[in-house]
Image: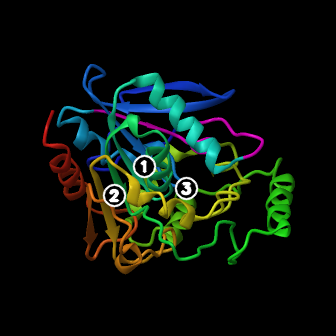
């Protein structure tokens, strides 16, 4: 296996699987397993090891950092169908396997929105919630790829299922390591090519004909199934645990497009919003030391 080292990136110290509703979910950890747990939830089309530069900074402060690859992503098993609620069930399975006590949770992008919904439904799991540019607004957004609309109709759902049917046996297009990094750069224009090459070595597999991302080919950018971001936004104001939201002010393809004014009246009374000036959607990768420091300060410093 080819390896591309990136300064500051550290591989997980533990890797194992958790079974969730019959689906194998890959879990990755940094830090001493006797320390208190801190959960990290990745975004759509990503995988847990995108935290390889961020998580070690939290682990060095005394936290046991746990992340997992969502079904169909990274090293987790592919499934027949995907949906928002299935991702939440998988999160519950992983978190329950680690602790029954409240724990801090960091969620990026889709992972941040997932955790808002879970924190609303099961607040006893959360001591703190930190959202990294995964704050949806009440503005109607697309929830099925390549489609904008304000109403869920049967044709939209049929198209979503038809896409899943036609891609059930598809394979991702192979390429060199640099090919995959440059493809990813179209979606992550603010991240360095060196980081993206490293990302390929931990998020793709090397086949005889080239590298392929491990992501299930049926996954489409932005398509989380029959779900709308504004449905999650309505849950945000009622959260009772300490809440920190970091909102990037530089828009890029994988971002949500949420603006500070879109969140007026939505930030819970127990929380605060920080606008990350001059930073893009992947705030924890652009500025891992800064963002890790903000998270640690919010959690009360080193453990």
**Toward which corner of the image does residue 179 lie, by quadrant?**
bottom right
Left or right: where 107 falls relative to 213: left
Q: Nearer the viewer, mark 3 or mark 1?
A: 3
Q: Which mark is residue 50?
A: 1
Q: Are marks 2 and 1 in contact (CB under 8 Å)?
A: yes
> Taking 207 as reference, is 99 above or below it?
above
Disc 2: which residue: 285
Q: Is residue 5 above or below residue 11?
A: below
**Residue 173, how many percent across, how many down?**
71, 57
- The residue shown at (13%, 42%) is 301
Residue depicted at x 82% and y 48%: 168
* Label 3 sits on residue: 44
Give whichever of 119, 184 is nearer the camera: 119
10 vs 254, left or right, is left
The answer to if 132 sits in the magenta stretch is no
Q: Which portion, as a residue range, is magenta?
A: 64-81
Q: Earlier in the sequence, mark 3 or mark 1?
A: 3
Element carrying mark 2: helix
């Amino acid at each position: 296996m080819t390896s591309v080292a990136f300064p500051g990136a550290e591989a997980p110290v533990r890797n194992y699987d958790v079974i969730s509703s019959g689906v194998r979910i890959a879990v990755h950890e940094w830090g001493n397993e006797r320390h208190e747990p801190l959960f990290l939830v990745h975004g759509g089309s990503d995988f847990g090891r995108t935290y390889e530069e961020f998580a070690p900074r939290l682990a060095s402060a005394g936290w046991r950092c746990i992340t997992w690859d969502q079904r169909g992503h990274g090293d987790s098993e592919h499934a027949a169908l995907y949906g928002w609620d299935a991702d939440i069930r998988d999160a519950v399975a992983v978190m329950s396997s680690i602790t029954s006590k409240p724990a801090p949770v960091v969620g990026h992008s889709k992972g941040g929105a997932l955790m808002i919904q879970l924190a609303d439904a099961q607040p006893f799991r959360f001591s703190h919630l930190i959202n990294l540019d995964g704050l949806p607004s009440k503005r109607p957004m697309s929830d099925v790829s390549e489609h904008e609309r304000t109403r869920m109709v049967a044709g939209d759902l049929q198209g979503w299922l038809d896409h899943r049917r036609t891609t059930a046996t598809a394979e991702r297009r192979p390429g060199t390591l640099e090919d995959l990094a440059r493809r990813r750069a179209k979606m992550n224009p603010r991240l360095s090519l060196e980081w993206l090459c490293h990302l390929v070595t931990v998020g793709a597999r090397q086949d005889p004909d080239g590298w392929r991302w491990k992501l299930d080919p049926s996954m489409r950018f932005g398509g989380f199934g029959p779900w709308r971001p504004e449905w999650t936004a309505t849950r945000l104001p009622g959260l009772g645990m300490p809440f920190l939201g970091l909102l990037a002010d530089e828009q890029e393809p994988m971002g949500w497009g949420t603006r500070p004014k879109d969140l007026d009246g939505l930030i819970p009374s127990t929380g605060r919003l920080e606008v990350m000036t001059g930073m893009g959607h992947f705030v924890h990768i652009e500025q891992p030391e800064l963002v890790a420091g903000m998270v640690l300060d919010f959690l009360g410093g080193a453990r």
